[in-house]
Amino acid sequence: MRTESKYFIKDNPTPFGIKKVAKSILAHIEQCRYKVKLNMIKCEQTEKKYKVSICAIFKNEAFYLKEWLEFNHLVGVEHFYMYNNKSEDRFEAVLEPYIKKGLVTLVEWPYEQKQMEAYMDCIEKYASETKWMGFIDIDEFIVPKSTDNIYDFLQKFEKNRGAVNIYWRLYGTSGQMERNLDGLVVEDFTVCWPKYCDIGKCFYNTAFGFEENSAWSRGLHHKFWANWKGKNVPPVNIFDHVCIGDINKADTADFPIQINHYFTKSYREYALKRAKGDVYFKINPHDEAYFYEHEMKCSSTDFSAYKYLIKLKLAMEE
């Protein structure tokens, strides 16, 4: 079983066999076909209220919200559509100043395991307000590297790309059983996988349409198929390669942007995360074995987020 390539580690590797080879060949053919189709699109952009927004669903994550909002705002996210999934902590106190400033729109979403439905609701209600809409979680931080602003990166895709997939840089515990929770997540955790995960999160170009409740809407945060004049088209990745199946191509190891995914944080935080359940899993399947499968791949370090630390700390003081 092949678990990694030159630039990627597979999050969910599948056995190698004749069927996999056949699927891979077909996927490469489809990749070329869709690239031609995408290049023929001429999309007219209109000015909207926001350039880049985030749709996020959360449950009992008040402690992490301020850092997450400040960091992602710092790198160019202009608005956050926050879907509250029956939280019982002090999330309202954290979000209130951001709501007053017009940075956050709070939506109550009391439905069990309806994450994709929340995203589709957000698209229907708010896509008209923003040029780009991303779908990320509270443990994910956008880290532009070739620029300091995510819109500067996304802008070149606006003409004819329906969605852009930004890959995960997966972080582990950095050897911490527990930590002082007054510390910053992006500062406390620096040990990560030596290569990028082959999974990421998508940013949707709202000049394109979207077909709800279709085969293309499942897992839309990972593989967002936009719709152009009645035809569904796949996302491209940050190197402008079409994302079909499990094909992931990169041109260099120097990725221009990434999403830092702090999947575990400390060991105690991971245990609490498993115990409380979340917006997607009623019974979290990420058990101890899954933890070590992830943790034992963490053999490198990445300090890319550190260039934003001083600005983040100043923002956190306000």
Image (cartoon, rainbow, N blue to C red):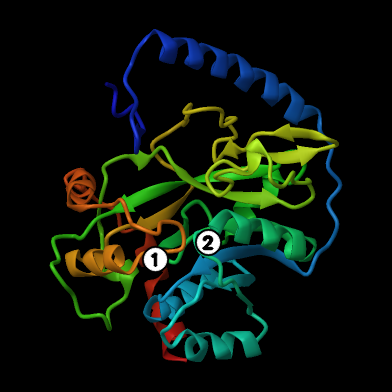
**Does 293 sit left or right of 311 as displayed?**
left
Image position, residue 199 (x, y; %): 44, 41
- Identified at 76% across, 65% down, the residue is 125
Q: Residues within 10 Å of mark 1 (few under 14, many from 20)?
A: few
| Residue type at numbered disc 2 | Asp
Q: Could you tell me the amino acid type at mark 1?
A: Lys
Kindly report the distance in space between the C-alpha atoms of the residues bearing marks 1 and 2: 9 Å
Left or right: 50, with 315 as reference point: right
**Quick one: 304 or 17, which is closer to the camera?**
17
Q: Position of residue 103 (x, y in %)?
A: 63, 79
Give the residue at mark 2: 148
Tag 2 or tag 1, which sits nearer the N-term?
2
Disc ID at residue 73: none
Q: What is the secondary structure assignment of the residue under circle 2?
A: loop
**Considering only vertical position in the picture, is 71 above or below 199?**
below
Q: Quadrant of residue 47?
A: bottom right
Asked if 42 appears above or below 189 in the picture, the reply is above
Which quadrant is home to the N terminus? Answer: top left
Mark 1 highlights which residue?
307
Disc 1 and disc 2 in contact, CB within 8 angstroms: yes
**Residue 9 left/right relative to 118:** left
Q: Position of residue 222 (x, y in %)?
A: 52, 45
Q: Above or below — where is 28 with respect to 196?
A: above
At horizontal 34% and vertical 38% (from top left) the residue drawn is: 11
Q: Nearer the viewer, residue 36 or 273?
A: 273
Regarding residue 75, the answer to whether it shows in the image is: no
Q: Between residues 73 and 23, which one lies in front from this camera angle?
A: 23
Secondary structure at badge 1 equals: helix
